[in-house]
Image: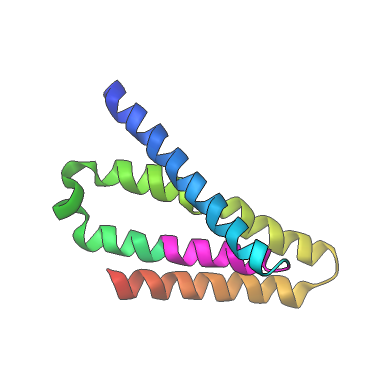
Amino acid sequence: MPSLHLIFLALSGGAGATLRYGAEELMCARWPHARRVAISVVNVTGCAAAGLLAAHGTKWFGSHVPLVSVGFLGGYTTFSGAAALPYLDFRHGHPRRATAGVIVTAALAIIAFALTS
């Protein structure tokens, strides 16, 4: 991979992570106990964007679709948050909330991808 691609990958990943952080913090500033919802919203919108890339990415980005999807969307979506919060819920005695969070987020993400691709 050419070094210019690696620089673009790093910059787009940083941009995606910055957008994710801003979106989560904006939602949590308005609704202080909405961290789980904020993470789910970010992941679902990231899947919707991945669907758009799957459908139209070549027209928009040519051969650079993998750099956009891995870089920007990889930085934007957050598997660690989506996995850590249900794990903590489960450990703290809230298995139903943990299970519901995983199932609802996954279902909405799949639907978002399907609707946009």
Write the residue at 70% across / 60% down.
Answer: 85
What percent of the width, then of the height, locates residue 57? 22, 54
Residue nearer the viewer, 14 or 6: 14
Residue 35 drawn in magenta: yes
Write the residue at 42% across / 71% down.
Answer: 110
Q: Is residue 81 visible?
A: yes
- Which quadrant: the C terminus? bottom left
**Which portion, as a residue range, is magenta?**
33-46
Q: Is residue 36 left or right of residue 113?
A: right
Check the image and report above or below for 15 versus 11: below
- Which quadrant: the N terminus? top left
Write the residue at 49% across / 75% down.
Answer: 107
Residue nearer the viewer, 23 or 30: 30
Residue 45 drawn in magenta: yes
Residue nearer the viewer, 109 or 33: 33
Residue nearer the viewer, 40 or 19: 19
User: Which residue appears farthest toward the top when viewing the image?
Assistant: 3
Number of numbered discs on residues: 0
Colouring rule applied to residues: rainbow
What percent of the width, then of the height, locates residue 106? 52, 70
User: Which residue appears farthest toward the right when viewing the image?
Assistant: 93
What percent of the width, then of the height, locates residue 58? 17, 52
